[in-house]
Image: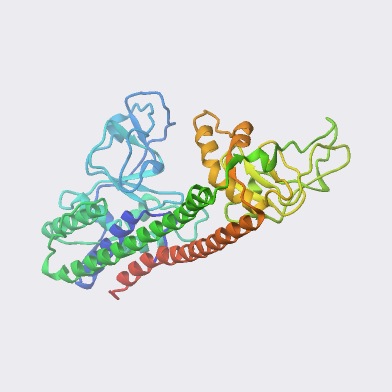
Amino acid sequence: MIELTFKQTQSEMMVRAAATVIFNGLLRAEFPNGRLSSITEHPQYGFGASASQENSGIKLVRITDLQDGKINWDTVPYCQCEQLEKYLLQPNDILFARTGATTGKTHLVKEAPAAVFASYLIRVRPQKEVRSDYLYYFFQSDVYWRQIIEEKEGSAQPNVNGQKLMNIEVPIVDNEIQSAISQFLEIVRQRQDGSIKQLPELPPLLEGQRRIVARIEELAAKVQEARGLRRQSAEEAEALINSALILIFEKQIIKQGWNLQPLREGAEISRGKFAYRPRNEPKFYGGNIPFIQIGDISKSNRYIQDYSQTLNQDGLKISRMFPKGTVVLAITGATIGVTGILGFDSCFPDSIVGITPHPNITISEFIYWSVEYVKKIALSEATQTTQPNINLKNIEKLNIPVPPLPEQRHIVAYLDNLQAKVDALKRLQAETAVELDALLPSILDKAFKGEL
């Protein structure tokens, strides 16, 4: 299957697949081909102007405005154009991207406000005997793309000029067949957007192609269903941990009669403030004092075992080293609320809070799971502010149960085992996601080769 240089949505891929099946069918039926120059007016290059957000009343359509068969006119900028009649877009105009990563991409103008097209686009207008939508859907097929790729190969900057474009060969069929093909492919597109319309009939010579397109849609729907089930199972796996925490901390522990107490009574809580250096000190990293940052705390790796940066001791005052086993919590930024356990003595900045268990009262892993359970209270308060951050006092006030150490270890072992199973399920889901992503292109490739 020909790989395009720009990413396509599933809707575009399905239209491309259906168009390829149809136009390959025309080729097998031995309809004559004609050059694009024989069925269109002379191609026209776009207007060279600077885009502006100031409302001049004239929109300027650029390559980047052509997205998934649509133009979002609200985001199209304006321009000044003194030759409006020459460049004004009209219904049934076809725009062609002539350079860049999306070279060859086309758009059919169905309706437009007062707008002109930019210089990196070419306008193509079909002659009267050729339907613009028939020509547009031909431009979605691999029959067209194979020719475009041949035309732009060998260029350092991918591009196809008007002359090369006019050399593209198109199957020449009568208006009745053009209309049937255009209506059929339009319904295919609408079905990708949720329409429940039935695929219309095609002329008898293309009935086999209709069955293939229906089969592609059926297989694509099954792929989408599998993707949905995978997403659902991922969400359910994540919810499983939360359900276990609720079961243990809200029901089982309270049932055992272990009273809740502030987190600060079972652990020492302090905000990071790792060091400072003299103003003219040129070196900051390169020493041997471990230093972690928010980015080192990962949801996928509870224990922080490796670090990539160390502080230079020379000229630095280390305000606090946190011992191995300290539970760290990001209290601001994009990763707010993410927790981890230090696998080594370390210092860190004030965007992280360290929670160090008191010996003989709590263990690190139990504090970790306790924070995982109760931090949602602090997070709910943090997200109500303009700049989300967790207040240190709110962390200190969080209440957790403190059962005997043997029971803490028993709870940790259960939750760790459950987390390991969830992580294994997530890895399997990630692998199946890759397989599912490859499945639809594989189906389309078989369709293009006539193997469906």
Is residue 168 visible in the rendered image? The answer is no
Judged from this view, the residue extending furthest toward the right is 314
Residue 417 left/right relative to 247: right
How far from the left and from the top, in percent, is residue 224?
Answer: 33, 60
Residue 296 locus on image (x, y percent): 66, 49
Residue at the limit of the structure toward the front, as seen here: 257
Image location of residue 88, percent across then percent down: 28, 34
Q: Say if 213 sits above or below 257 in the image.
A: below
- Residue at coordinates 36% horizontally, 60% vertically from top-left? 229
Is 417 located above or below residue 62 in the figure?
Answer: below
Q: Position of residue 451 (x, y in %)?
A: 30, 76
What residue is at 37 percent from the left and 44 percent from the top? 121
The residue lying toward the viewer, choosing from 312 and 38, is: 312
Q: Quadrant of the N terminus?
A: bottom left
Quick check: 58 above or below 288? Answer: above
Name the residue located 49 percent from the left edge and 47 percent from the top edge: 250
| Image quadrant in which you'd find residue 317 | top right
The quadrant where residue 65 appears: top left
Horizontally, residue 255 falls left or right of residue 22, namely right
Query: What colouring method underlies this structural image?
Result: rainbow
Q: Tell which residue pokes out farthest to the bottom in this image.
A: 451
Locate residue 303 relative to residue 320 in the image: left or right.
left
Residue toward you, 77 or 246: 246
Quadrant containing the C terminus is: bottom left
Instruction: Count numbered badges in the picture.
Output: 0
Q: Say whether residue 343 is left or right of residue 120.
A: right
